[in-house]
Image (spheres, coloured by chain):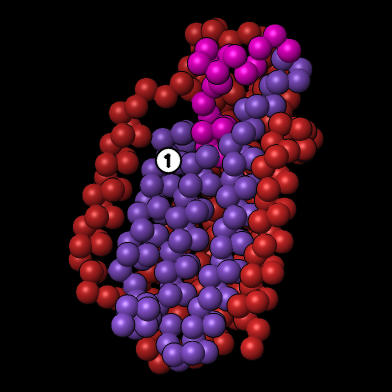
Amino acid sequence: MIFDGNESTLAIDIAFWSISASTIVGAIAVVQLKDLFRAALFLIVSLLGVAGMFILLRAEFLAAIQVLVYIGAISILIIFAIMMTRDMDQGSPFNILKFPAALISILFCSICIVVFLSTDWNLMEIALLDKTLDSTLIDGMSNVFTNTIPYIARLLIGNFIITFEIIGVLLLAVIVGALALVRE
Amino acid sequence: MNLENFLIVSAIIFSIGLYGALSKRNAITILMSIELMFNAVNIAAVAFSRYVVPAKSAMWMIGDDIENSVQFILTGHIFSMFIITVAAAEVALGLAIIIAIYRNIQTVSVTNMSDLKK
């Protein structure tokens, strides 16, 4: 059974903590490193950590998309742009707003954490304990999470079809725009 | 490992990205920080879709036809797929703009990109 909370074993906990530590360390390295190329490589580490987190959340299809799109395409694009704009001797300096920006970020992070910890979330486990959910509904939801791909396909082509089409038009516009911008 | 753990990791990554986007001079680093922020939002969306019940407040969507409407708990996955697509589009266009600017003024520092102001 997926939702009764007994999947929180020691191995999964260790996986979660190591993945989140590597993700956060990679993110800090992206911001703090002077060398742009190394920052881009640490961005890849951080994106891989996010893919691992998707696997822990039973979103394997999204993890595959994350690896293909982010690591396969976006980071390669960023590395190419770093190599084409030879500003490497400068590295990536801070501007004059370094300390106000740090203050705002820490403030934002602590407000978010306080809100997350004090909100009474409508959790799946609590609903299972209270027996407020229909049993056919629970069976259906655990079916969805055993194999998400057919349900994602149905949602994408059925209920979200207009967004799907608009995303196609957006990608076409981006191709045309990027070509027009980069052409000599 | 529960919902709050994922949300806190997401908030930390979002704040690091916010700090980078606000305090850096190099345009490519700012783009990378924005990518970090997108990823934090994706983690939060997928975690909500995994842990939070579409309970009484969302029962209008589930309805009687459980077979065909239980898939709506995957809406977070759909949202993060769209976010990933839009992020890819944004990076492609942003890097094209950065390269076009670099061709003209030989710098990628955002403090020097003030030609429109003069």
Is residue A37 visible in the rendered image? The answer is no
Relative to A83, B110 lies left or right: left
**The magenta stretch spans which residues?**
B46-65
Is residue A171 placed above or below A31 in the rendered structure?
above
Per the rendering, the colour in which chain A appears is red
Front position in the image: B93 or A105: B93
Please, what is the dominant secondary structure of the magenta stretch? helix
Front position in the image: A165 or A96: A165
Tell me where residue B74 appears, x and y as whole percent.
64, 32
Q: Residues within 10 Å of mark 1 (few under 14, many from 20)?
A: many
**Quadrant (top left/top right/bottom left/bottom right) for the C terminus of chain B:** bottom left
Does the magenta portion include B64?
Answer: yes
Is residue A50 placed above or below A138 in the rendered structure?
below
> Which chain gets the purple colouring?
B
Q: Chain of mark 1?
A: B
Relative to A103, A163 lies left or right: right
Q: Which residue is mark 1?
A: B7
Q: Count the numbered circles shown.
A: 1
Amino acid residing under circle 1: Leu
